[in-house]
Image (cartoon, rainbow, N blue to C red):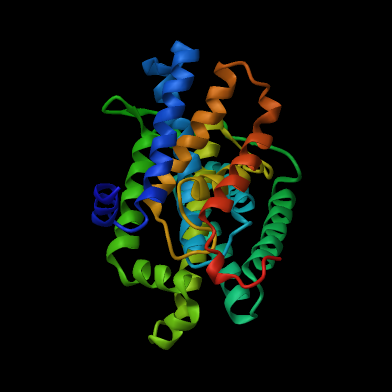
Amino acid sequence: MGRIQSIRSALPTGWISAATPLALLVALVLVIGSIAPGFLKGDTLLLLLANTAVLFILAAGVTGVILIGGIDLSIQAIASLSSVVLAQLLPSLGVMAFPVALLSGVLFGLVSGIVHVRLKVPSFVATLATGGVVAGIALWAADGRSITIEADGRAYTAWINGDFAGLPTVVWIAAVIGFLLYLAMRYTPFGRYSLAIGAGEPAAIAAGINVDRNKIIAFVVSGAMAAIAGIILAARLSSGSPTLANQLLLPAIAAVIVGGTAITGGLGGVGRTAIGALIISIVRMGMTFVGINIFAENVVFGAMLILAVAITIDRSKIAVIK
């Protein structure tokens, strides 16, 4: 017993919460692979990585908001709007449609941040309202229909659907974004301040941290990542739609929480979200391989989210759960 205690004391604090998602990921691969051997084939794994890329980008963006103790419920609407903007503007603007679509996400991320910080509206309400506005704009701009990216426009999106060094380009895009966000969260004041705010906002204010500015930056990053996810979705599906990403909100938030980032903030990071996104994608694809009804998908994600929140929530920060 004494030896076990000494081993535990030598390990970093929180190692169990950090190791559990990785252990779950390995277990899922082994279980599904044993039930359906085709799951471990190279083509299937490449498809898994490509499908995970968009989910990871969306989840990586919202990770920063959750780390400060907030939530962003507008990401699926922003992703859908950016897909509409890209599909509409590609014929007239060409390659310049990409930065315009990205700026749409930055703009509404900024709106969410300002509403939350300046008007003192809880992030849940602020982003829910912003998401509703964005969804309405997307429906109006697209006239309530999908917008097909024609052959001329697809010439500008072909690179997203291509391969590089044996991997789909979207996987490389997700890897670069993930690496940059990891560096930002680990080695910049923004990342350190985000963790401090999530761990205890009054203490962060007392330490002289510009909490309001940091929160706004977190929402802007979340909006930008949602826009990038929407751009990739539009390129892969050759169309933009005001409802294109509507089914991605729950999986994205589940990826963050299942990966080990605490819903109360102050603990977690982009690396954990990458593992969480893989878990969600494996569960989603594995359900098809083992013959589980695809309509049960949200039931599974909801159950996983409840379990993950119950495990990771820091109840010491919340006097009353309501």
Residue 94: x %, y % from top left? 47, 44
Is 291 rendered above or below residue 117? above
Query: For this view, does 194 lie left or right of residue 85?
Result: left
Q: Is residue 93 above or below residue 71?
A: above
The location of residue 322, given as percent across then percent down, is 71, 66
Residue depicted at 66% across the width and 25% down the height:
294
Q: How far across and down, in percent of the image, does residue 254 sit?
A: 56, 46
Asked whether the viewer can see residue 12, the reply is: yes
Within the image, what quadrant is residue 208 found in?
bottom left
Residue in front for this viewpoint, 78 or 104 = 78
Work out which residue is located at the far top of the displayed protein and give it: 37
Return the residue nearer the eye: 173 or 261: 261
Residue occupying the point 70% across, 28% down: 295
Q: Position of residue 164 (x, y in %)?
A: 30, 30
What residue is at 35 percent from the left and 61 percent from the top? Answer: 185
Q: Is residue 170 left or right of residue 252?
A: left
Query: Which sits in the foreground, 179 or 89?
Result: 179
Q: Quadrant of residue 174?
A: top left
> Relative to 56, is 120 on the left or the right?
right
Residue at image position (30%, 61%) is: 186
Residue 153 shows in this picture: no
Looking at the rendered structure, the number of numbered marks drawn on it comes to: 0
